[in-house]
Amino acid sequence: MYMVMTVINQHDLKNVLEDLFANNIEGITVSDVIGKGSFGLKEADNQPTDLVSKVKLEIVVSDVKHREIAMECIRSNCHDLGRGAGKMWWLDVGGVERIRTGEKDADALTTQVNKKIQNVPCGLTTQIDTPCS
């Protein structure tokens, strides 16, 4: 499992998220951040620069294939030959647990659609067996 993290421009966020969801990659954390990409607080012309507002995405995926898909979604929507397009990096993840259900690792990363959760009653009720006021 891998965590892909990226810092990108705010205006690229919508396209990145749409592309990730289209590729069935869910479970994304988005944070507002500020930062400066190059080392130092002065540019080549010795002028001071400001910290820039960006967004940071954190995405945990189950395997190399999904890591590469997530990275391509980011790359294709944020690639810019100008300065400040952002950075992305990845880390190995030792384990994941979904707190609500106790599912672990790859099972904890899958979507909940059409998934039966153990020990959770799943039945329809009617007005006959459900008290109404």
Image: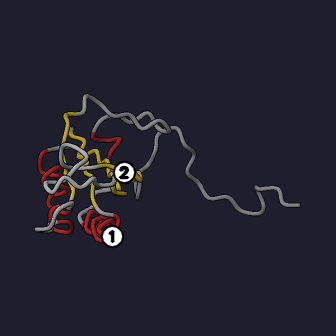
**Residue named by callout 2:** 34
Badge 1: few (under 14), some or many (20 or more) residues near its Cα, within 10 Å?
few
> Quarter of the image containing the N terminus?
top left
Against 16, is 69 above or below? Answer: above
Q: Residue at x 40, y 58 (%)?
A: 113
| Frontmost residue, 112 versus 76 | 76
Badge 2: few (under 14), some or many (20 or more) residues near its Cα, within 10 Å?
few
Front of the two marks 1 and 2: 2
Against 22, is 121 above or below? Answer: above
> Quarter of the image containing the C terminus?
bottom right
Q: Residue at x 82, y 56 (%)?
A: 131
Question: Which of marks 2 and 1 precedes in the sequence?
Answer: 1
Kindly state the secondary structure of the residue where label 2 is placed.
Answer: strand
**Residue named by callout 1:** 11
Q: How many marks?
A: 2
Residue 29 at x, y percent in the picture: 38, 50
Dot 2 amino acid type: Ile
Q: Residue furthest right?
A: 133
Residue 5 at x, y percent in the picture: 26, 47
Q: Residue at x 67, y 58 (%)?
A: 125
Dot 1 amino acid type: His
Q: Residue furthest front?
A: 46
